[in-house]
Image (cartoon, grey):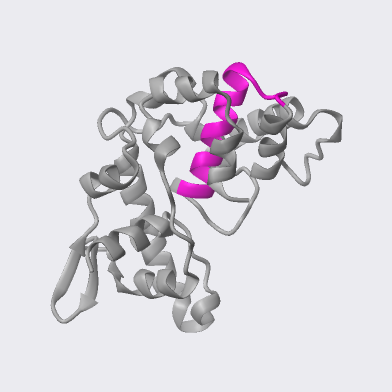
Amino acid sequence: MKFKEIVAALGDTMKGQVVAKNFGGLLQFKPHELDRHLICWLMRKLNPETMKLETGGGKEIAITEHSVWCVFQIPNAGSDPPHMTDDEARIIRRELGLQICGNVYNPRRGFSAGDILDGLNKKTLRGSLGLRAFFMCAFQSLLFSNTDAYIRLEDVKYTEDLENIGNRNWCKVVVDHLRKAARLYRKDFPEKGIIALISGCGIFLMMLYVDNL
């Protein structure tokens, strides 16, 4: 499931709400096709201490909040995301799963971006629930992506304060996530090689690198 499918499923009203939260750049985002081999190479070149892509020949590309904004045009000023314990997030995720999936919700399975896409296409996800579902997908499948298609506790926490979601510095969060992802990848790569888990916004690294060729 691709993020562009989520965007295509939004009605005009919800698109207007996304714009009002200062995330209109995501509606215009035209992602490249992901090249896993390129992203793996970029993850190995990302120095998590300096947050620069060290691509060889002395060339370095800085990973900054501004460069994230240039790619996504998401909020780049304000406070950090709201705090919530994992136990609190689990309870809320279960409640959201029931609202989104109805009687077919399985708490052991959770719910996925695909379930949200289905609800958007069927027009059963509307209002604040639909808007929150969109942002959970944006975080899960694009800005803080990994290989798991299911909505994580992190996605629940980040979208809890929907009223103020546009007043957070999400560009900083993207950079911080990439720093953690690069450290984890460097730790796992010697043992797992190219199958090591890639987390963080790999598509951002790829687009930034291509734009700097």
The residue lying toward the viewer, choosing from 187 and 122, is 122
Q: Position of residue 112 (x, y in %)?
A: 68, 44
Which image quadrant: the C terminus?
bottom left
| 107 displayed left or right of 6 | right
Residue 98 covered by magenta stretch: no
Q: Position of residue 162 (x, y in %)?
A: 48, 22
Residue occupying the point 22% across, 72% down:
54
Where 13 falls versus 59 (above or below)? above
| 132 displayed left or right of 166 | right
Residue 128 covered by magenta stretch: yes
Q: Main secondary structure of the magenta part?
A: helix
Where 9 falls versus 64 (above or below)? above
Residue 31 visible: yes
Residue 85 visible: no
Quadrant in the picture for residue 151: top right
| 99 displayed left or right of 1 | right
What span is colored magenta in the figure? Answer: 123-142
Quadrant in the picture for residue 100: top right
Q: How many marks?
A: 0
Residue occupying the point 45% across, 17% down:
163
Residue occupying the point 46% across, 20% down:
16
Q: Residue furthest left?
A: 58
Q: Residue furthest right?
A: 103
